[in-house]
Image: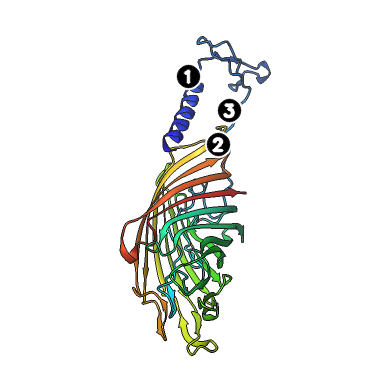
Amino acid sequence: MLIGALIVCDFGFAEESWMADADDDEFVIEDPMLGGLDEELQLVQSQPSRRGRPPVTSLVEPSARRRRRVAASGTSLLATVPGMFGDFFGGGRPVSGPSGGPKGAPPRGGAAVRLVKISENFSPQPRNRVYVTHHFFNDALDGSFGDVNRYAFGFEHLFGEDLWSFELRAPFAHTLSSDQIDDPVSSKDTEFGNITMLVKKTIWSNQQTLLSTGLGVTVPTADDVRLFRPSDRRLILEVDNRAVHLLPFLGLIHTPNEHLFIQGFTQLDIDTSGNPARGDLMAMNLQPLGVVQDPTLLFLDLSIGYWMCEDSSRPWITGFAPVVEVHYATTLNDSDLIQRSGFQIGDLSRRYDILDFTFGMHFEFKEQFSLRPGVVVPLRGGDDQPFDYEVFLQANLTY
């Protein structure tokens, strides 16, 4: 795919060179009505090319390349920078009951759709767009989740003199079901996730650099987690999905020249309330076990890309840029762990430090539509390796 894109770019450059090498004759005719003034009316008359190429006729200067729509928050150079790709699985650690081993259903319900990372298919610059994404995770969480397919739909819209934008994300995934039987065998289902709303604002920019900040709010729209006894399907454990997460962030874009672009994010994920858990301790009604609160997360993300070609006059692919990214995620405090009457809710490791490498390719069509395939490889092992590898495809339409 990378070689094919480079061939398309080379063809485009060759076409531009062909036009530049054309040696058609030009005649300059003085207008007698100018009365001896030095001004001239230039008419370009085409003549057969001595190289046998088709003639080129024009009475005006060649039309300039169409410029992108530029928000008040930046320049046309900043507007060319594609959003970051991302890497995050979305968390989830086992719960278990008295009759079975560790379960894959996490305290938040489902998996890969509970926690949100700002850098996923996101730009520091406010923009108008709609998008859809697909992420495939191979053997998530040491294989306890198996393979997970995550999807998301969303839109972003400018407001406030184009210095602000509002975004809405709605994820869902084919993953472990939020309803599980208390035995080692887990069931899968399609799970709707927590909806996230984001507000972003440009706080400073010049010709080459832009700095923005914002706040995301993730609301608990996903299902509760429920665990049933194998013998009679009696409900023995329930973890409510009640936590609201706050996602403050800073974003930066820097474009040293028209080809190279660098961007980065710093983000926190703060669980404001936690999720209540109830269990059947005495084979009767569910009794409170406690509140499971996610640890505060810190994300640091860096992305570097390079435009191999970018020309809106081309009929098909108008731009191509390979991108490499490094992503770091760490817990700032221990995660909660409840162990009571045979129930276990939470992560025994309590903390993690995840380091991932992302390689993606940004294909642009007529400056409005983009397709973005890529792959993510974890750089650490053990509890710090959320999956074996990730493959994704992102599609964006700007307006």
Q: Describe the element under mark 2 as helix, strand or loop.
A: loop
Q: Residues within 10 Å of mark 1 (few under 14, many from 20)?
A: few
Image quarter where the N terminus lies is: top left
Q: Amino acid at mark 2?
A: Ser
In this rendering, which labeled residue sits more in front, label 2 or label 3? 2
Q: Badge 2: few (under 14), some or many (20 or more) residues near its Cα, within 10 Å?
A: some
Residue type pointed to by label 1 = Asp
Residue at 53% of width from left, 62% of height from top? 201
Q: Which residue is mark 1?
A: 21
Q: Residue at x 44, y 41 (%)?
A: 307
Q: Earlier in the sequence, mark 1 or mark 3?
A: 1
Vertical side of 243 occupied by 260: above or below: above
Q: Earlier in the sequence, mark 2 or mark 3?
A: 3
Q: Amino acid at mark 3?
A: Pro
Q: Would you name the residue on which mark 3 appears?
A: 62
Which residue is identified by label 2?
Answer: 312
Q: Position of residue 345 (x, y in %)?
A: 43, 78
Q: Nearer the observer, disc 1 or disc 3?
A: 1
Relative to 31, 313 lies left or right: left
Q: Estimate the spatial distance between the alpha carbons at disc 2 and disc 3, rounded to whole Å.
A: 14 Å
Q: Nearer the viewer, mark 1 or mark 2?
A: 2
Image location (x, y in percent) of residue 387:
39, 59
Question: How far separated are the C-alphas under marks 1 and 3?
Answer: 15 Å
Q: Quadrant of residue 138?
A: bottom left
Question: Residue 233's spot in the image, x, y percent?
Answer: 55, 77
Q: Residue furthest front?
A: 231
Q: Say which element carries label 3.
A: loop
**Which of the marked residues, 1 or 2, is nearer the chain's N terminus?**
1
Secondary structure beneath disc 1? helix
